[in-house]
Amino acid sequence: MKSAQIENNILVVKDRENEKLNGRKGAILRGLGCGLCGSDIVKLKQHLVKDGTVLGHEVVGRIVEIDSDTDFKVEDVIVTSHHIPCGKCEYCKNGNVSMCRHFKETNIKPGGFSEFIYVSEEHLKNVAYLKPENLTNEEASFYEPLACCIRAVKRACLRQNSTVLVIGLGSIGILMSQALRAFGMNVIGCDLIASRVQVLKNLGIEAFVLSEMCDSIKADGVFMTSGADKAIDTALKFVRDGGKILVFSSTPQNFGYANNEIYYRELTVLGSYSPSPVDLRDSLELLADKQVNVAGLSTVYPLEKVQKAINDTLENKILKAYIQL
């Protein structure tokens, strides 16, 4: 089978042995497509994983082999996430599922940018669903990233009709804006790139180029979906006293917050990372009900062009890449 694996800090498509059950419970998927996540790019650029690693976790695939106690069967087209919390540890009991050690150890094999993928029985029972018929494969690949956004919305615990500013309108910022609206928030988006602002406007959400933002805006919550260091100053500028800043982005280095602003203004700053199984279920419902519209957000690349997809993403030529397998 063909897989895109890391080799000398780029992704190279190579042949490797096909994934088979070989007595394991679970299923083998014929990969149909996989979204390119920003975390894939971070892992690659910052050398966080070793050569030979196959990235990709926003998977849509068709079951070609299965041994499972679930109702899934051969030929079913499913979506799945890659990590599963144990539900029993102190992290899980306190709602920090993405800090669960079991969560971090579970994964699909070898990764989403592969023609064949092994999905465990635990995945099938907890984080896999049939693809809704009204979603294309490309649209269904947003199942996991949208769930990450839903997780962030829930963690912020904002009141209904709160005013929320989303800083950074890449694909995650656009998903986050729609998730916030679906949960009853009044959403404003901003970005440096006018074309991205227009995408959000086309979805019926108020948005501005950053330089055109009115200084009088004071948001109950600010969601940082941009990893630029200036996003911190923007968040502090537009959050109201006593408001919340939700960090949903990584940065090349740790940029600190002004301690005195947090102290004297009674600001709450919190982070959010990965979703729980419940967030994944909610994500699929929002996609299927079209409360979150992802049509046209991604650009399709064949597996052989996965490195070009990464380069185009880094150069802001596209919002998001979908790797067709």
Image (spheres, rainbow, N blue to C red):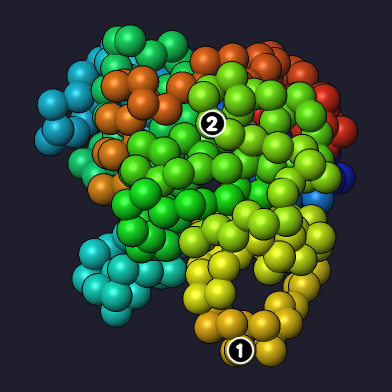
| Disc ID at residue 205 | 2
| Disc ID at residue 264 | 1
Front residue (pair 87, 233): 233
Q: Residue at x 36, y 63 (%)?
A: 157
Quarter of the image for residue 17 reads top right
Q: CA distance from mark 2 to mark 1?
A: 32 Å
| Disc ID at residue 3 | none
First in sequence: mark 2 or mark 1?
A: 2
- Point out residue 224 in the picture as x, y percentages from the top left corner: 63, 56
Q: Residue at x 70, y 31 (%)?
A: 197
Compared across the picture, whether 195 is left or right of 98 comes to right
The answer to whether residue 219 is seen in the rendering is yes
Image height of 266 relative to 324, above or below: below
Mark 2 Cα-neighbour bin, 10 Å: few <14, some 14–19, many ≥20: some
Q: Are marks 2 and 1 in contact (CB under 8 Å)?
A: no
Quarter of the image for residue 10 reads top right
Front residue (pair 265, 124): 265
Which quarter of the rendered picture does the C terminus lie within? top right
Compared across the picture, whether 16 is left or right of 210 comes to left
